[in-house]
């Protein structure tokens, strides 16, 4: 499998292993994603450079993003990732998770709006409160107080939901920083996903 995109730019500063050379469990996970999505998101290929960290990363990712309990929808979760990744200037996560946000929210405009300025986005007051908190966690977690919890409680988030918002923000803070350090390049496929009718 090629480790470059059509315009010959590398997807990472670090070596990108061939799928055939990966441990069985990682290869199977990547091939399952490829079958479902129709392509392999570059995050899977770049992080496979360190198999143990790949496993730990995706175990935590899946625990946060695929859980079926709580009051956050899939669109809510992707909205948090898109908004906070924009604050961290992470091209990969804004583009990739923005694509997922457009799909889950069934809105071709929402990801661009949230990434640029969630205060001007076509979102609900509940989502605005969620993003206000997530961005505070992203930029100044030490400043979080009981007042922040009170605002979220008014919008019917419980404490477990607040944990989820903070954990998603914190986890993707790690992801954003690594993506920037290794120059992880978004797949071209992400740019049009959820923008045009099929």
Image (spheres, rainbow, N blue to C red):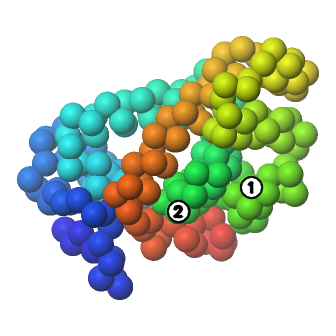
Q: Position of residue 43 (x, y in %)?
A: 37, 54
Judged left or right of residue 49, residue 80 is right
**Mark 2 nearby-residue class (10 Å; few <14, some 14–19, many ≥20):** some
- Sequence order check: which comes first, mark 2 or mark 1? 2
Please tell me which residue is depicted at 86% across the width and 19% down the height of the picture. Answer: 147
Please tell me which residue is depicted at 12% across the width and 42% down the height of the picture. Answer: 23
Q: Position of residue 15 (x, y in %)?
A: 18, 60
Please tell me which residue is depicted at 27% across the width and 36% down the height of the picture. Answer: 53
**What residue is disc 1 on?**
114
> Where on the picture, by quarter, is residue 57?
top left
In the picture as drawn, the residue positioned furthest to the bottom comes out as: 7
The alpha-carbon separation of the residues under discs 2 and 1 comes to 14 Å
Which residue is more in the foreground, 139 or 191?
Answer: 139
Reply above or below: 158 against 53.
Answer: above
Reply above or below: 180 against 76.
Answer: below
Please tell me which residue is depicted at 38% across the width and 63% down the height of the picture. Answer: 183
């Amino acid at each position: 499998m090629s480790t470059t995109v059509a315009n010959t730019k590398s997807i990472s500063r670090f070596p990108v292993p061939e799928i055939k050379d990966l441990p069985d469990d990682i290869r199977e996970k990547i091939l399952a994603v490829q079958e479902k999505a129709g392509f392999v998101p570059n995050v899977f290929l770049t992080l496979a450079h360190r198999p143990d960290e790949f496993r730990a990363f995706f175990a935590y990712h899946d625990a946060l993003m695929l859980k079926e309990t709580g009051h956050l929808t899939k669109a809510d979760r992707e909205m948090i990732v898109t908004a906070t990744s924009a604050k961290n200037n992470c091209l990969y996560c804004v583009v990739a998770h923005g694509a997922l946000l457009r799909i889950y929210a069934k809105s071709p405009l929402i990801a661009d709006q949230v990434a640029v300025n969630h205060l001007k986005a076509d979102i609900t007051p509940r989502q605005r409160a969620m993003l206000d908190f997530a961005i505070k966690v992203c930029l100044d977690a030490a400043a979080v107080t009981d007042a922040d919890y009170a605002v979220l409680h008014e919008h019917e988030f419980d404490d477990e939901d607040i944990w989820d918002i903070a954990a998603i923000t914190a986890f993707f803070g790690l992801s954003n920083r690594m993506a920037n350090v290794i120059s992880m390049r978004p797949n071209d496929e992400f740019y049009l996903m959820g923008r045009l009718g099929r």
